[in-house]
Amino acid sequence: MIEFSPWPPELAERYRQAGYWIDQPLTHILDAQMAAAPEAEALVCGARRFSYADLDRMSRNLAAHLAGQGLGHGDTALVQLPNVAEFYVVFFALLRIGVVPVNALFSHRRLELAAYAQQIAPRVVIASRRHELFRDDAFVDELRAGGAQHVLLLDEDAPALSLAQRLARPGALPPGAGPTPADQVAFFQLSGGSTGTPKLIPRTHNDYDYSIRASVEISGVTAATRFLCALPAAHNFTMSSPGTLGVFHAGGTVVMAPSPEPLACFQLIADQRVTMAALVPPAVALWLRAVEEDPARRAMLDSLDLMLVGGASFAEATARQVPERLGCRLQQVFGMAEGLVNYTRLTDPAEVIFTTQGRPISPDDELRILDEDGNPVPDGTPGALATRGPYTFRGYYRSPEHNAKAFDAEGFYHSGDVVVRQGGNLRVVGRIKDQINRGGEKIAAEEIENLLLRHPDITHAALVGVEDSHLGEKSCAFLVLRDGAAKLSPPALRRHLLDLGIAEYKLPDRFRQLPELPLTAVGKIDKRRLRDSLAAAAVTA
Ligand code: OOB
């Protein structure tokens, strides 16, 4: 079994009593559709269409192959696939035999994948030759040296390595193969992070399944829903809020889009009669602009009924434009891979939908909004969010030190968000975690600072967020160089970071070199002053 921090027995008991945890593995999502409507359309991916029966058959073929190789409970997999149907085939195949995957984002590069591999020691690797890391066999060989025995690749010709061949070759599951128990880890979600290394979030079948079922209700997903999967498939928003798994749960159809780029998405919406989409705020802005540029495009969005927006702060003025310009309803989502998800409800008054990020999924989501001394603040006053509940995790994988800081004695997870509660709804108004939210993509400042410090000429580094009209926030790295070192150019600094293998979205947008970094009274780097200096420079510029 994969270790994780369990809920205390009395809470587990309560979540079962209340009907949240129903002790079914996530594979039940597929089994239920196989019983109800196997020929219904599950997925559209480019020119390919997959029924639930196709999805089930291919995932069983792969599961049978892997189980036949001796893989099962206690094993892990590192998966990196783009937005393609195979993402779900692989996910269900691994769940089917109790192999626990980490689904890396397709934008992740060597550093992120190596960090995940180091933490889970995967026996299985499933990736795509279209990704630069897998274009040749160097990284695969490294993973093999670390214990990965089974490698399957998409867009690969060699039969031994070809994922496509494995999905097509019929196989039967050996007796005894099955998912992990529902109260155990099903897979790992990825944390946006605020620490030096990317952290993993164990999610159990029970907790994840509940968040999916409840989200399906809240967003009104049905078998008639046709959902556009345009954000990265592996992200928690895309997977479960209510996301692709929510759509499968309801028997609807997922339409894969390679990215949220508006014109390609509009065409898919028109061709595939998409009814529901999920976007981060900068993508919404691009969609609005595309309609503004050519109002005739609005007709392409005819079938679109509901747009979910989350992942980063969504300006009220932009929110108000969604129904007007895109012709669909809006639902705001404030969630986290760690668990807690808040939604505005479809029946809420317009003011609530435009000006808040909604309220939690569950009556048993316990929220505390705390001042600097850890005391609850009154409604209407900003405070730090802490939460526990039936689908909020209880600890990062193998990270006792960080867990000691992220959780309090009562098991509340401190998300690092600053929120205001008003009339039962939350507004996200700030952040105390050392993270930059670059249009929904999260950057842990410490991770980038550590990598900058690996440059021989850099002695101090601090990464801070800078306001940005499109992305909400961009990143700026403040650097102090070794005495006598020549100034470093931004391209050279980016090259240094890329050579270390980070995802491109984590590259600082700006660099500033200073003789020294300002310190607080206790001698920590004063990031507030750094941020203020940028804001002041923007005003005078
Ligand atoms: C979602 O998940 P993550 O894990 O990438 O990021 C979580 C963090 C939150 O702690 C918060 O800082 C920020 O992203 N965030 C928002 C937000 N939604 C997320 N900040 C302001 N307004 C919002 N609406 O981002 C995620 C997971 C599930 C559903 C939706 C988003």
Image (cartoon, rainbow, N blue to C red):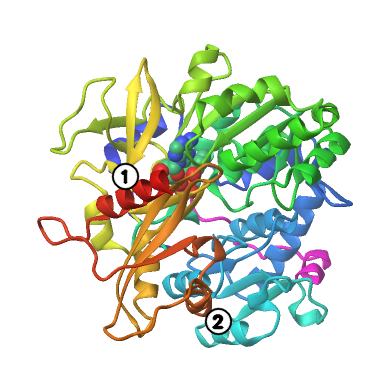
Q: Give the number of the mark in front: 2 or 1.
A: 1
In this rendering, does residue 1 appear at all?
no
Q: Residue at x 62, y 39 (%)?
A: 279
Amino acid type at circle 2 is Leu
Part of the protein shown in magenta: 163-184
Badge 1 element: strand
Mark 1 within 8 Å of ligand 1, using the beta carbon: yes
Relative to the observer, which residue lies in front, 75 or 446?
Answer: 446
Residue 516, visible in the rendered structure: yes
Would you say the magenta stretch is mainly helix, strand or loop? loop
Residue 229 in the figure: left or right of residue 354: right
- Picture coordinates of residue 496, whole percent (x, y): 48, 79
Q: CA distance from mark 2 to mark 1?
A: 34 Å
Residue placed farthest to the front in the image?
Answer: 540
What label sits on residue 302 in the rendered view?
Answer: none
Residue wearing tag 1: 416
Quadrant hosting residue 198:
bottom left
Q: Is mark 2 within 8 Å of ligand 1?
A: no
Residue 235, image x, y percentages: 56, 50
Q: Is residue 320 above or below residue 276?
A: above
Residue that carries the numbered disc 2 in the rendered image: 143
For marks 2 and 1 on the same chain, the one whose residue lies earlier in the sequence: 2
Task: Identify the residue at horizontal 82%, vertical 25% (top origin).
Answer: 302
Which quadrant would the N terminus be assigned to in this image? bottom left
For label 2, the crowd category at 10 Å Cα-Cα, with few meaning under 14, some 14 to 19 and many 20 or more, is: many
Work out which residue is located at the far top of the displayed protein and give it.
349
Residue 183 screen position, x and y as percent: 44, 48
